[in-house]
Amino acid sequence: MLRLSGVTVRFGDRTALDAVDLTVEDHETVCLLGPSGSGKSTLLRVVAGLQPADAGRVSLSGRDQADVPTHRRGLGLMFQDHQLFPQQDVAGNIAFGLRTGVRSGGGAGARPGAGRLSKAERAERVSELLELVGLPGAQERAVGSLSGGEQQRVALARALAPTPRLLMLDEPLGQLDRGLRERLTVELRQLFRRLGTTVLAVTHDQGEAFALADRVVVMRAGRVAQTGTPREVWQRPASSFVARFLGFENIVPATVRERGADTPWGRVQVPKGTPSGRCELLVRPAGVRLTPPEEGLKCTVTGITFRGGASAMVSVLLQPVAGPPLTAESPLSRAPDLDETVGVTFTGHEVVVLPNAAEPA
Amino acid sequence: MSGPANGLRSRTVSAEPAVHDTGGPAPGANASRPPATRSVRRRAAGVRLALMAVPVGFFALFFAYPVVTIVGRGLRADGRWQLDRVGTVLGDPGVQQVLWFTVWQALASTALTLSVALPGAYVFARFRFPAKRLLHALVTVPFVLPTVVVGSAFLALLGRGGALDELWGVRLDTSVWAILLAHVFFNYAVVVRTVGGLWAQLDPRQEEAARVLGASRFAAWRAVTLPALVPAAGAAALMVFLFTFTSFGVIQVLGGPRYATLEVEIYRQTASLLDLPTAAVLTLTQFAAVATLLLGYGRLVRRREAALPLVAAAHTARRPSGAGQWALLWAVLVTIAVLLLLPLGVLAERSLRGPDGGHGLVFYRALFELGDSAAFLVPPVEAIGNSLAYALAATLVSLLVGGLAAAALSRRAGRIVRGFDALLMLPLGTSAVTVGFGFLIALDEPPLDLRSSWILVPLAQALVGVPFVIRTMLPVLRAVDDRLREAAAVLGASPFQVWRAVDLPLVRRAVLVAAGFAFAVSLGEFGATVFIARADHPTLPVTVARFLGRAGELNYGQAMALSTILLLLCGAVLIVLERVRTNNAGEF
């Protein structure tokens, strides 16, 4: 469906996108994940034709888009702050893409003038979409009277109305409160499944990306840092940058010898087949086992954080006698007290060797 | 009075509530404050009344009273109103011709100004290019120029022996084109600043959203940007129409005997023919037309308050890309150079000529001499000092009256107060000639015998200055977040300390800007001043007009020299203003 090769965008001497390659298959939901300034939104703008690329190719359904203006690309784009048209009511906003006369669908490519709908058909489509996003009967409401969540839904309905072959979402749920965000993420995922929509979304929230996406693309400073399913990325971060961005903190330099690695925390078991030499090591909190003080690495408990949510787990912040601080995970019932001295051992299958230690994090 | 526009200022007034939607409380948000006790409320009303007393008194005494007196002088005979004169005067074919010309030249000027200035508004709003800020200031210079200087500049360019005449033998001063072009020259900034100011703040992503939904570049502009701009463009058009409808100085200089607007005709009837009844009817006609226009304007401004998603103007401008955008940018720059800068340049060049065809300061030197004619009682150069002194006094009066009115209007506004708001713009559209002559007739008896007092001129000039002061200060005062005052009060500040700590720092800059505009406008006031300035104390515009009314190269050259001095004075004031304003977040 969408294929980017070597796309580069420069703003003055700052490179926003640096030779990015990316593909999105039909009916796939891909999430671009990265900190702000990593080039995610610029990438969406390049795909939409709102931002010319300095180098590289964008092709949709196998057709190069270099000479195709924005309005003929047959895309949907949901802006971060919605950009609903204040002069038009809800129905007017949703019907906008139906009136412009360029419709596209099912990967057939943009067909100018094809499928222009009559007024009655448009009204029917609008009410259909409002039904779909859970706002039935909102046609005549003024845009200004909508709450944040409602604006979100109208923006989504507007983007979906012309059945775009690729729907792009820029921080789709960024401005909503947590509860609404989690509910909408699930709803969106189900909706895209049902409609078979191809989606390219951008977010800086890993939870959102993991919940929404079939595939996650982690970006860093205009480059793709890692691509994979949410599970792959979470289990095997490709670099310490990705690991840290996902919220992991137990990362230390290490030297691998045979089945173990020498770290400031002592010797840690590593997966079979890990090549010898210098690298960085991630120990997921679940792999940090708390033991009585006489066993393993001796640590002082410096902090305990309740995670909230449904899980009864707490994060335990530890200061080992040697090496950087550690985070461990513990059930609430067995959590140690503050300032208590505990021991720590590491479980091998929660240890991840981060390959490119050469690159500074 | 064909003074400069207040359209610029009112832009902020209307854009401001929209900005508020995302930030602090809107002006009307005061209503949600906890209910005040009766005594507090009564005291607030008392304060408002006290603040209002001076402006109301000022306008009653120096605007309503003179105008009513002179209209009454014209329309009352034998102790009765002679309203049948209205029909007689308006039935006169000569008057009808004047009316027709007034309307159509105003319509044509407005259409021409819009078509020339709207591309300029777009370029200033959306493109980034070198020296943009300087150019933005330069474009505004004509707008604060005295109309007489505008007339002289076009005379120097298009008139007999003008630059075009010398080069190609083209003369336009006998055609209506000179008038229309001068009006475009004068009002270009109104459109660029009113429309362009809003345009620059419209979020470009609105258009992008439409583009992604399948709208072509033009369709997106038409569907999203145009509706957002229509009220602003309409308000700008109305302002331009108002200024050209009441145009006096420009037509007086360029119109010759063939073309006269209502205002020029009022002057002719009053000053030359002493036909007060006709002048009174014409004044009333103009008054009715202007009041209707202002009502429409008020309605447009209110409509403009529909909340638009506005963003900081600095983020929306980009370097032009593509041949089309570069061509547009250059077209606008060339237009500005030819239409706005060339006349000013020619004016300055003319003033530096000598009788022998070379260049020198002959005309400037001549300003220091009394000359052989009996036209002047004092050396013309004294007009500079007079003008500066008058303008200074007028500025002080404007600041006092306008500041008090703005302070009163910025408080919780009821319907009556809002009506007062619109009323304050009336002096801008009322016949300045009538006001001037009314001053002479009404203010010459005790207890108000000001006829021989120097204060008469600054008072008349302040009538045009006050609306500017109000338009500048009101949005700033209204924008002061009430919670700031509350925070100061909670920290133990007395009302005076609150004012000094919160209001004053925010308003100080607006006061400076208001003072500058009031000064420039007073400096250029012509229609009223021409009546009341005493022969031994002429102002610059009056002297320029007198020079232009006399034959001979020396008179013409001296007019150019004085106009250049006036131009430099106004330009200097404006550039200082731009500097003050660049630190100011708000668009004017």
Image (cartoon, coloured by chain):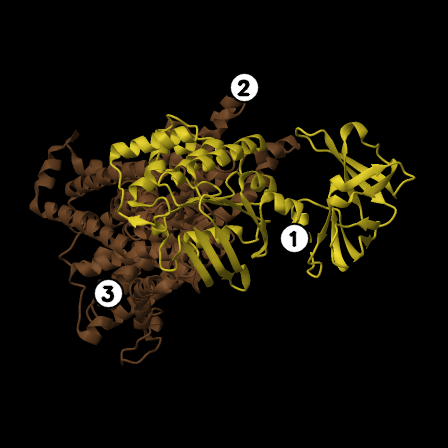
Q: State the hue of chain A.
A: yellow
Residue at 76% x, 31% y: name it: A331
Res B122 quadrant in image: bottom left
| Residue B155: assigned label | 3
Image location of residue A318, percent across then percent down: 81, 41
Image location of residue A183, percent across then percent down: 54, 31
Residue at 54% x, 42% y: name it: A213
Res A84 quadrant in image: top left
Please, is residue B277 above or below residue A337 in the view?
below
Helix or strand or loop: what does disc 2 sit on? loop
Indicate left or right for A252 with A206 as reference.
right
State which mark lies toward you, 3 or 1. 1
Q: Which chain is brown?
A: B
User: A256 or A309, which is in the foreground?
Assistant: A256
Residues packed near mark 2 inside 10 Å, few (<14), some (14 to 19) or many (20 plus) = few
Disc 3 from disc 1: Cα separation:
76 Å
- What's the residue type where badge 1 is placed? Ala
Disc 1 from disc 2: Cα separation:
68 Å
Image location of residue A282, percent across then percent down: 73, 49
Q: Same chain for the residues at labels 3 and 2, yes or no?
A: yes
User: B95 or B558, which is in the foreground?
Assistant: B95
Marks 1,2: beta carbons within 8 A: no
Chain of the residue under label 2: B
| Residue A238: assigned label | 1
| Residue B37: assigned label | 2
Residue A301 in view (yes/no): yes
